[in-house]
Image (tube, coloured by chain):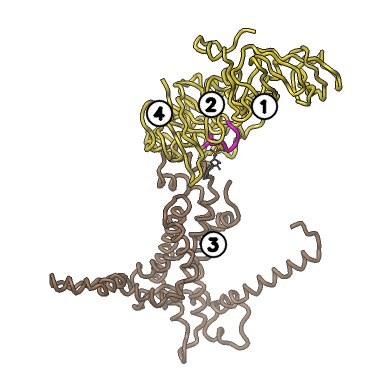
Chain colours: A brown, B yellow
């Protein structure tokens, strides 16, 4: 932009400033709430300035939410989803861009369609699969009469079971199976010159070698950008972990945090809840700050 | 012995045929240039040799062995690409050493090979740099280093000089030739630049529309073009082509202006032909022409003139004796320097006598 109008500059800056304030206000209120005791947090009118009880509240929240174990669960899930998605996205895009095969266009559109079917939309069937991942196969066997046949011939009752509720697999796998990232990778791979692929072929590198030695190093910034987005995304997941972890001990921090929210006539100790919220915010914040440099580069540029 | 044999090699893209059954035997240790206008299928041919493109029909042999089904890395060929295709995230040393790394060579051995190759290309000081920090000529040399490092039997170059500026191009041309002499492998280079083809080649293959028009030494192809296309494509400024008619007896032509031109040997054909003569072969004589334009080329001048009857003709003249615009001159077309073509098929017409003398290995009768 080469606009040179001072009043426009002032206007945009004021607008940006107000937007930033509007976004930060709830965070500030949460922080203030976390620094008061029970009386202070429930005072009317509300406190705008911090009080002295931050550390007490943090300790209380950590205790009450069993955050030591919940953080571990959430971390494993977030890292698992992030790593799994990146791997899946990269391999899917790799197959779509660098290979010629018959079903390519069909597969491309199938992947594309899943963009329109996020987990929330297909949550019931997904839950059914998580309850028994082999249920679809069992249904096929039953419908085709193979089950009865085998039972009649050998007396063995075929009953396929793979239960994923309350397991890391159940938490992670359904969150991995979406197309986000596949398209980001596809766009990036399409910018790789054909000659580079051929040079690697001449040098004797097979497809996986090419992926490892050329594509992965070249897509470092893309990986960083995707990892940041996906970590925050999976850390913040609520609905799916809530459904799939029927045992309270298997919950993620997000689910735990919602359990801490006072309901009905329980004590309205929002100070502890907000302290918990602050704690829960820390890991994604740390990841964003740490990855910021690569993250911005990955979204803005393609390394030439 | 031939290094590469193409036997009826064909390439179809869907219903389109890019290469129409080519038969070629490329001599061992020679510098072979495949020359042709853009889109004629040069790259496709080279890529079929490299194994980057499947062969629709026919057979490719390298060193006498059938290669159609072999992987690129198993063909003993290395390739230098037009845009160099260096790995942007690897240093010069890593780029050059990559084929060895893939082949599983141990690090120490690899580094020694890389250093050796880099030294021979004067890249020793640049080993730690990335391709992005190199000039065009340096990148070109890195690409050659990567090709050399595995000591292939055949080097394939696809328009390797076309991304360089004019001066560097001439310099790299010499370097390519020098490297070829030193390595003793077979080199196959694809280009659309006829000058590059003439200067580099031991063996020149001229292609058009997916077919080989002519193959031979540059001298042979230049002095005895097999078709109107080759005659016009090779040489700059290109050959003068004049419509003419063969008179009874076969040894005299009549030009459009009514003037007669004697041939060295009688032709079997009668009727319309195309007469060709290179600008450097036009002399003074009795053919009236008017000077239209004079181009100063430095060492000499190029005169564009019009013959009586309307045909255009260009010829070289020493700078000191340059004619003026509008001047009337008499030109001579020495019989030994004439090329005759069938205007409909474009094929070269052989003189009756030449056809008879061919077995004596005489290309041109002495004028
Ligand atoms: N991948 C392809 N698919 C379809 N047609 C192609 C492909 N590659 C080349 N061609 C066609 O084959 C012909 C020869 O191409 P190419 O060998 O690249 O020509 P050159 O290198 O001589 O300029 C062209 O007409 C081009 O359109
Ligand atoms: Mg080409």
Please tell me which residue is depicted at 81% across the width and 66% down the height of the picture: A7
Q: Indicate the quadrant of ligand 1 in the picture.
A: top right
Q: Which residue is mark 2?
A: B205
Please tell me the numbered disc located at residue B312. none
Q: Secondary structure at mark 4?
A: strand
Q: Is residue B172 visible?
A: no
The span from disc 1 to disc 3 (Cα, nearest Å) is 50 Å
Residue of label 4: B62
Q: Nearer the viewer, residue A90 or A11?
A: A90
Q: Residues within 10 Å of mark 2 (few under 14, many from 20)?
A: many
Q: Residues within 10 Å of mark 3 (few under 14, many from 20)?
A: some
Query: Which is more foreground, mark 1 or mark 4?
Result: 4
Disc 3 chain ID: A
| Mark 3–mark 4 distance (CA, rounded to whole Å) | 56 Å
Instruction: Kindly report the secondary structure that dominates the magenta region of the rendered protein.
Output: loop
Image height check: is A287 above or below B151? Answer: below
């Amino acid at each position: 932009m080469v606009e040179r109008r001072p009043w426009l500059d002032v206007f945009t800056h004021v607008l940006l400033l107000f937007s930033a304030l509007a976004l930060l206000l709830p965070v500030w209120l949460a922080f203030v709430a976390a620094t008061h005791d029970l009386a202070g947090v429930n005072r009317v009118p509300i406190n705008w300035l911090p009080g002295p009880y931050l550390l007490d509240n943090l300790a209380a929240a950590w205790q009450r939410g069993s955050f030591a174990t919940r953080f571990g669960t959430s971390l494993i899930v977030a890292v698992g989803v992030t790593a799994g998605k990146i791997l899946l996205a990269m391999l899917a895009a790799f197959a779509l861009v660098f290979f010629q095969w018959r079903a390519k266009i069909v597969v491309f559109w199938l992947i594309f369609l899943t963009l329109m079917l996020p987990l929330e939309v297909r949550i019931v069937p997904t839950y059914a699969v998580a309850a028994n991942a082999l249920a679809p196969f069992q249904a096929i066997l039953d419908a085709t009469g193979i089950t009865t046949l085998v039972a009649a011939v050998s007396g063995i009752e075929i009953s396929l079971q793979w239960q994923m509720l309350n397991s890391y697999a159940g938490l992670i796998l359904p969150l991995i199976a979406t197309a986000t990232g596949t398209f980001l990778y596809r766009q990036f791979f399409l910018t790789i010159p054909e000659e580079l692929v051929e040079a690697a072929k001449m040098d004797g590198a097979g497809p996986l070698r090419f992926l490892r030695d050329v594509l992965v190093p070249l897509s470092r910034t893309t990986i960083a950008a995707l990892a940041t987005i996906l970590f925050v995304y999976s850390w913040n997941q609520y609905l799916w972990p809530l459904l799939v972890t029927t045992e309270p001990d298997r919950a993620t921090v997000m689910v735990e945090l919602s359990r801490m929210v006072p309901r009905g006539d329980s004590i309205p100790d929002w100070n502890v809840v907000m302290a918990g919220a602050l704690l829960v915010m820390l890991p994604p914040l740390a990841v964003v700050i740490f990855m910021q440099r690569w993250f911005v580069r990955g979204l803005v540029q393609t390394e030439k | 012995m031939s290094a590469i044999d193409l036997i009826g090699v064909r390439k179809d893209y869907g219903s389109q045929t890019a290469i129409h059954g080519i038969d070629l035997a490329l001599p061992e240790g020679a510098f072979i240039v495949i020359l042709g206008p853009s889109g004629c299928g040069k790259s496709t041919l080279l890529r079929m040799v490299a194994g980057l493109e499947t062969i629709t029909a026919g057979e490719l042999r390298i060193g006498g062995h059938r290669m159609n089904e072999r992987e690129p890395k198993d063909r003993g060929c290395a390739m230098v690409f037009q845009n160099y295709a260096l790995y942007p995230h690897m240093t010069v040393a890593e780029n050059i050493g990559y084929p060895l790394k893939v082949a599983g060579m141990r690090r120490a051995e690899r580094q020694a090979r890389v250093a050796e190759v880099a030294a021979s290309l004067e890249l020793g000081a640049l080993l730690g740099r990335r391709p992005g920090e190199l000039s065009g000529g340096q990148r070109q040399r890195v690409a050659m280093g990567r090709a050399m490092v595995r000591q292939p039997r055949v080097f394939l170059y696809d328009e390797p000089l076309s991304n360089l500026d004019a001066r560097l191009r001439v310099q790299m041309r010499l370097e390519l030739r020098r490297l070829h002499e030193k390595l003793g492998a077979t080199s196959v280079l694809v280009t659309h630049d006829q000058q590059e083809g003439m200067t580099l080649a031991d063996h020149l293959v001229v292609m058009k529309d997916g077919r080989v028009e002519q193959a031979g030494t540059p001298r042979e192809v230049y002095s005895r073009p097999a078709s109107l296309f080759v005659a016009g494509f090779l040489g700059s400024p290109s050959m003068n082509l004049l419509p003419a008619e063969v008179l009874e007896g076969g040894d005299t032509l009549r030009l459009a202006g009514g003037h007669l031109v004697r041939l060295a040997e009688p032709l079997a054909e009668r009727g319309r032909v195309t007469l060709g003569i290179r600008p450097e072969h036009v002399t003074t004589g009795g053919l009236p022409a008017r000077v239209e334009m004079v181009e100063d080329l430095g060492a000499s001048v190029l005169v564009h003139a019009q013959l009586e009857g309307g045909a255009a003709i260009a010829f070289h003249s020493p700078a000191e004796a340059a004619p003026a615009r509008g001047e009337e001159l008499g030109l001579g077309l020495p019989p030994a320097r004439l090329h005759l073509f069938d205007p409909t098929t474009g094929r070269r017409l052989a003189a009756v006598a030449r056809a008879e003398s061919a077995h004596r290995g005489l290309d041109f009768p002495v004028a």
